[in-house]
Image (cartoon, rainbow, N blue to C red):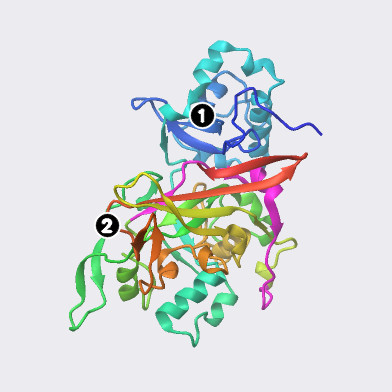
Amino acid sequence: MAVLQSFVSVHPDSHFPIQNLPYGVFKPQSASPPRPGVAIGDFVLDLSEISSAGLFDGPLLKNSDAFLQPNLNKFVSLGRPAWKEARATLQKLLSATEPTLRDNAVLRQKALVPMSSVELLLPVAVGDYTDFFTSLHHTKNCGIIFRGPQTPVLDNWYRLPVAYHGRASSVVISGTDIVRPRGQAHPVGSSTPYFGPSLKLDFELEMATIVGPGNELGKPVDINNAKDHIFGLVLMNDWSARDIQAWEYIPLGPFLGKSFGTTISPWIVTLEALEPFASEAPKQDPSPLPYLTEKEPKIYDISLEAHIKPAGHEDSGVVSRTNLKHLYWTLTQQLAHHTINGCNLRPGDLLGTGTVSGPEPESRACLLELTWNGQNTVSVNELNRKFLEDGDEVILTGYCKARLYPQLHEASIIP
């Protein structure tokens, strides 16, 4: 079977081959209105131009204004049949053998914008944001650090995907500066809490689901239909102030230690692009309750890395290597559980996985675990770090690799 190739020049090491085509929102120029696009090689394909040219001519998108919006919320609300139709149309238009866009110099000039010249924006308007806690390794390590080794994982964790409701207003696009938060922390040597800038600023290497069609209030999503409510995935960094978090989290969980900033990547990689990298989910013991029991539990084999570029340095260093397949609870279980009480999800909602730590020390996906709450250090370019210092830059990457027909292709989350 022939490998699909694009007429757009795509470097073999590009994160954005025609097999990927992640969706985002961008401005071609600073004064331009936002519009949807897909990444292809070193370009962004302007979907508003493709739509205005009448090239979305399938039955579901022919008369739709979904790509004339300032965000992707309307498009993701249309559901999987429309997503598949759009993907088929775009892969055909961008293929090396299709002349419609390839040979139309005027449209090609308007629609293919160099990625280096655009401003990338939040791909969706996030109405609500929930962060789960679904890596057993992260849960166990945090339990030992905060509560001791006797009961690091509480019994309920094995029965349901634990989560908390985050702050959607502080979800920002990759590249946005994060201001070190101020707050209270445990008293040191007195009965008065510390107050001031956080001394334990941390990152969390996560991924997050972008919700597609929502559900009506009072009508839960069946576990075996949950996949149809997931448009795709982004990388996510749920910035964390560990000292503020440790002082405030009992009895109601995270608040100011988390709500000051959550960063997501600009490109949403669809489940269709990720399908070749689906694998069997880990066995769960005890078996989940019937409403969380899937016919075919799947997780995605996505390699993840966290890099830190110290302040004043040109180069970054890898501090964590992990994989999404280390999650205990699947993405579909997270979504189904979120709705089982009748909670209504809406298009563009963000569901974080929680920190994606794996079983090995180098797969611990935050500094809290890597340094064991500051007892140890990690080395970054011959510098020692316990937690993040002012001016440090955190870079998260994700990619999939598989041998298909039989060449190597990648579906990358963020360059």
Q: Is residue 219 above or below residue 14?
A: below
Indicate whether 41 appears above or below 383. Answer: above
**Amino acid at the residue labelled 2:** Arg
Marks 2 and 1, how far apart at CA: 33 Å
Image quadrant in which the N terminus is located:
top right
Residue located at (65% from left, 26% from top): 6
Q: Can residue 220 be seen?
A: no
Task: State yes or no: discs 2 and 1 in contact (Cβ < 8 Å).
Answer: no
Is 199 positioned to the left or the right of 252 in the image? left
Q: Secondary structure at mark 2?
A: loop
In percent of width and height, residue 32 lies at: 38, 25
Residue topped by disc 1 = 44
Marks counted in the figure total 2
Q: Residue at x 50, y 17 (%)?
A: 110
- Residue hosting label 2: 180
Q: What residue is rendered at 31% in x and 66% in y? A: 200
In this view, which residue lies farthest toward the bottom?
Answer: 150
Is the residue marked by circle 1 packed among few (<14), some (14-19), or many (20+) residues within 10 Å? many
Secondary structure, mark 1, is: strand
Which circle's residue, 2 or 1, is located before the other in the chain? 1
The residue at the point 57 percent across, 62 percent down is 334
- Magenta range is 261-289
Horizontal side of residue 28 vs 334, given as left or right = left
Image quadrant assignment for residue 120? top left
Residue 272 belongs to magenta span: yes
Q: Is residue 411 visible?
A: yes
Between residue 252 and residue 119, name the one nearer to us: 119
* Vertical order, 321 against 2 (above or below): below
